Image (cartoon, helix red, strand yellow):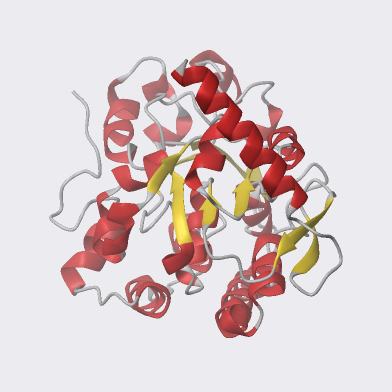
Amino acid sequence: MKKIFGFVIVMLLTIILGGCVPKNNDDMIKVIDMSGEEVYVPKNPKKVAAVSPSTGDLMVAFGLGDILDGTYYSVTNNPWVAELYPESKDFYGYDYDLSVESFIERGVDLIFIPEPETAKNLRNHGLNALCIRQFAETGYGDYVFYFSNIVKQIWGDKVSEKVDMWQLEFTTAINSVKDVLSKQSNLERRTLYYVCGDKDRGLGYTDLGKSLLEYVFDQLNIDFVCNRFETNKPSAEAVLQINPDIVVIGGIYQQYLLQQIEIQEPWKQLKAVKDKQVFNIPVAFVSFEQTCAESALFIYDMANKLYPDLFNYDIKTLTKECIEKYFGYTLTDNDVENMLNGLDKNGEPLIWKE
């Protein structure tokens, strides 16, 4: 009986929500999401579900943390999140396959979610949902600023200064490294394999490209070999067949994975491991390699690590400035050292497993 009653309530809410979303009036604004859908959403929403980690990061960075109902559930497993933004303790932990009923019960008036079909289904039930993802079929270069422009379109003057500043910082970082690299003659284009350590899925968990990762490494004249795999869970043998020159490891499990790549067969046979060309990607609110407040830092940090003879950006100072600017948190020298090394504030692994 309770289930039936709950279903009836959800359906009534769906009808009410669906019927109370007028199109083309002064309270709504038309937005084109990343799947190309035209969607009318309320201006200045007051309760937002930023389901992917990157959208949660940028919402906080752009000064909208107070209207953020929650973000992807694993984000708060990262101890830096509570440190940089204590209010995150109240975040609801969303998942990509959360039911329509759950979103309705949360009472959110806008949802950012990666899957276009999920967004469409939510809209069919009267919810305001936009598809915002970390990749684009035609390549990510033209989409780096897509979400930030949508945020600016919806919240206007409240966020415009920080959005413009963030976009300028990213563009400046890209242009800075490209300018130096363009002046190098006979620059070797090395191969790189990326390990996504956001989840406990081992060394054979990666990104298939058409993403910020592929775009940034292409600007750095690096061949992102992950786009050659048919699955984002390639076998060790498949990676070994390519035998990349470089391996980079991000995410909260990175310390464990950095250890494992040195001792696991056949991973330890990789050229990158033997040549000591395995590098970590720092983590702040989220991993630097996502479309996030820290994206410019990702570019500078990778330039330093991949071309130590060409670049020497003051990544510690840049990181301190970024975190202060977007999260209002002052990092100590020890903090920034730990953050850049993929450690928590106390110098311990962000997450560990035996």
**Residue 308 location, x and y as percent?**
44, 63
Residue 250 showing in the rendered view: no
Q: Residue at x 26, y 62 (%)?
A: 86
Q: Is residue 155 above or below residue 229?
A: below
Q: Residue at x 68, y 53 (%)?
A: 215
Residue at the spot 45% in from the left edge and 54% down from the top edge? 69
Q: Nearer the viewer, residue 181 or 330?
A: 330
Residue 180, horizontal then vertical, whole percent? 62, 73
Residue 265 visible: yes
Left or right of 144 on screen, residue 88:
left
- Residue at the spot x=53%, y=15% of the render? 235
- Residue 186 lies, in percent from the top left, at 70, 58
Q: Quadrant of the C terminus?
A: top left
Of 318 and 92, which appears nearest the observer?
92
Can you name the residue that lies furthest to the left here? 346
In this view of the protein, which residue sits in the foreground, 59 or 135?
Answer: 59
Instruction: Please identify the quarter of the rendering in which residue 318 is found.
Output: bottom left
**Image location (x, y in percent) of residue 153:** 72, 72
